[in-house]
Image (cartoon, rainbow, N blue to C red):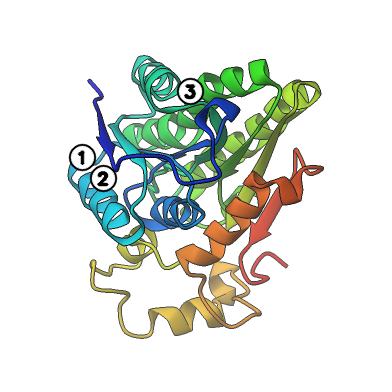
Amino acid sequence: MSYAQREGASAAPGFARERGAVALVTGAASGIGLAVATALCKQGRPVALCDRDAALLAVAASGLRDRYAADLCTHVVDVRDAAQVDCVVQHVEQQFGALDAVALVAGVLHSGEATTVTTEAWEESLAINATGVFHAARATVKYMARRGRGALVTVASNAARTPRLDMAAYSASKAAAVMFTKCLGLEVAARGVRCNVVCPGSTDTPMLRAMLGGGTAGLPDGALTRLVAGNLERYKLGIPLGRVASPEDIADVVLYLLSEQSRHITMQEVCVDGGATL
């Protein structure tokens, strides 16, 4: 079962709990999710960190608390389990504060040809990347809709909009998450809740490093150069801006879509990939 642990002491000045100031991030222990959580903490937002990796989550929360005196709660939760997700969100609402910003970043990548990818890999891809988004969005949006305010951002992938070799399971699951989020946004727009999607391209995260055969220390020699240059034999055109994204590049766009600066934007899909999906 999931559990919760408070980190920090009080909300930052200017964010009254009763007015709804709490953000929730799934996949918050590393990569883009951690970058989003970090950016929210820099703003002084109380943040609920959710991830299924208890050890990494504890390290992430400790670092945020030490660097930003962040007001956090942590929840070990598997987004595949609807009951766990519902329990966590209920706890956040009742014990930590009213949600008004949700970033759904949890994801998994299984590569392989469409005709040979295992059933287990296909099912886990859909269960985490698509059904996990459904579980977390359903659990959180209902609270925001009742209050008539809030924003949700799903982090998908540019692979959801462009066919990729050996990525059928990943691409299909992310495409499902994109369309679900847009449909949800249409349903709750009249109740003051906005739902948008950010689609990163190649981003220097543990997921990318693992896909390219790298370890936690970084990418293999020449990997960044090859990603930027592209590979026409693999039907990849490269990255026109000439660099692989950092997690912070993606987090900046997520924060914009969660903020009041984007108050008239909903049901949109923003591709953040340096022009790779031209």
Q: Which residue is label 1 attached to?
A: 54
Residue 54 on image: x %, y %: 20, 40
Q: Which residue corresponds to mark 2? A: 57
Q: Nearer the viewer, residue 209 or 51?
A: 51
SS label for mark 3: helix
CA gap between label 2 and label 3 equals: 20 Å
Q: Amino acid at mark 1?
A: Ala
* Percent coordinates x, y for residue 37 in the rendering: 43, 50
Quadrant location, the C terminus = bottom right
**Alpha carbon distance from label 2 to label 1:** 5 Å
Q: Amino acid at mark 2?
A: Leu
Location of residue 187 by image quarter: top right
**Residue at 38% across, 29% down:** 79
**Mark earlier in primary sequence (1, 3):** 1
Q: Secondary structure at mark 1?
A: helix
| Residue 202 can be seen in this image | no
Quarter location, residue 253: bottom right
**Looking at this rendering, what residue extends furthest in the front direction?**
13
What's the amino acid at mark 3?
Answer: His
Check the picture and name the quadrant holding the N terminus: top left
Residue 45 as seen in the image, left or right of residue 48: right
| Eye-nearest disc, 2 or 3 | 2
**Element under disc 2:** helix
Query: Quick check: marks 2 and 1 in contact, CB under 8 Å?
Result: yes
Q: How many marks?
A: 3
Q: Residue at x 53, y 24 (%)?
A: 140
The residue pinned by badge 3 equals 135
Q: Measure how far apart labels 1 and 3 are at the Cα level.
A: 20 Å
Residue 237, compared with residue 194, is above or below; it is below
Q: Is residue 168 above or below residue 35?
A: above
